[in-house]
Amino acid sequence: MTTGAGGAPAASTPPATSTPPPALEITGLSRRFGGLFAVRDVSLSVPPGARFGVIGPNGAGKTTLFNLLSGELRPASGTVRLHGRDVTRLSPPRRAALGLGRTFQITRLFADLTVRENLTLAVHGLSRSRLQMLRPWRSYRKEQRRAEELADSFGLGGRLRHKPRELSHGELRELEVLLALAAEPTVLLLDEPAAGLSPAERVGIQNLITRLPESLTVVVIEHDMNVLREVADWLAVLHVGQLVTQGGTADVQRHPAVRELYLGSGSAAGEAGAGTLPTPPTPPTTAGGQ
Ligand SMILES: Nc1ncnc2c1ncn2[C@@H]1O[C@H](COP(=O)(O)OP(=O)(O)OP(=O)(O)O)[C@@H](O)[C@H]1O
Ligand SMILES: [Mg+2]
């Protein structure tokens, strides 16, 4: 952030304002694989505390966009700002330390550790001291308490002694969100948290997302409009790497380009924003690079 604290502000410095900068702001972001753009010239601004959905057909570039935001990938061009700070060249851990948390489309958990242990390690990741292999587990009391609080407040308190393989698919996805929350992010990126879940499990993860702290900025990639309607009030639509449109969730559902993209031209389905966008078709082009 550039508030010019202490120093003489340059003549061109805009007047100080109490409006906080966007939690996330991306400008002209592009990334290619081989000859094809996975993300092309995408600009978005996500205000603090927003519930922001990202939708688009398979291969639209949604996960690539998240990878560019979290630093797993570097853009060919464009910038990423987190709370006003340019983080485009920072590593994923540096961005995480500045408040960026995420979950992945593919589960990443320690399979041989219990829910309590997985969460305790995630909480410990916050502290400056490195994990010491010889330190007794019971000495992580403070971290364990925080892990238990987290599990209790989001409905996984009864599963603390269990290992990931003993959890339902829905509970696993919930645990992944809690692991990301353990790092106390200010911006949380969720990549298809409801993918592959039964309707009942979808309601579970949806409830968890709606109970996240209001101050947390949440960006969620999701195909299921029933989930998105509950958890997002703003949607951005990607297709073959480009931003098709963005706006309020109901408006985007009604948007002609979005309906064409998901339903095909002339379809009467999804009327008046009440319908559920079906699983989108695969895009017409495929990647040629590696
Ligand atoms: N590491 C990579 N190497 C080569 N091509 C890639 C790589 N990652 C993504 N791509 C390609 O970039 C495009 C966008 O992929 P991405 O995974 O971002 O799409 P997505 O919108 O998340 O799709 P889905 O809904 O299936 O998860 C696709 O054509 C994909 O094949
Ligand atoms: Mg994806």
Image (cartoon, rainbow, N blue to C red):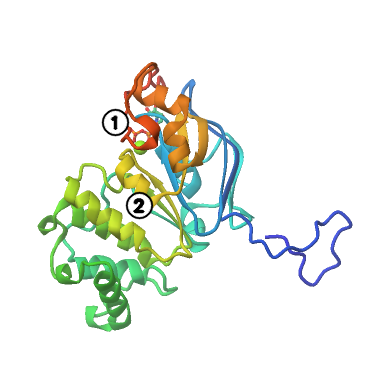
Left or right, residue 112 beside residue 233: left
Query: Label for residue 278?
Result: 1
- Pick whichever, 139 or 4, lies toward us: 4
Answer whether residue 61 is visible to the viewer in this image. Answer: no
Query: Label for residue 103?
Result: 2
Badge 2 amino acid: Thr
As measured in the structure, the alpha-carbon distance from the residue carrying label 2 to the one carrying label 1 is 24 Å
Where is residue 2 shown, x and y percent of the image? Answer: 72, 60
- Pick whichever, 266 or 55, lies toward us: 266
Under tag 2, what secondary structure? loop
Where is residue 265 shown, x and y percent of the image? Answer: 39, 16
Badge 1 amino acid: Pro
Image quadrant in which the C terminus is located: top left
Tell me if the residue at label 1 has its CB under 8 Å from ligand 1: no
Left or right, residue 191 beside residue 25: left
Where is residue 18 shown, x and y percent of the image? Answer: 69, 65
Q: Indicate whether 54 appears above or below 23.
A: above
Q: Earlier in the sequence, mark 2 or mark 1?
A: 2
Q: Quadrant of ligand 2?
A: top left
Residue at 47% x, 37% y: name it: 251
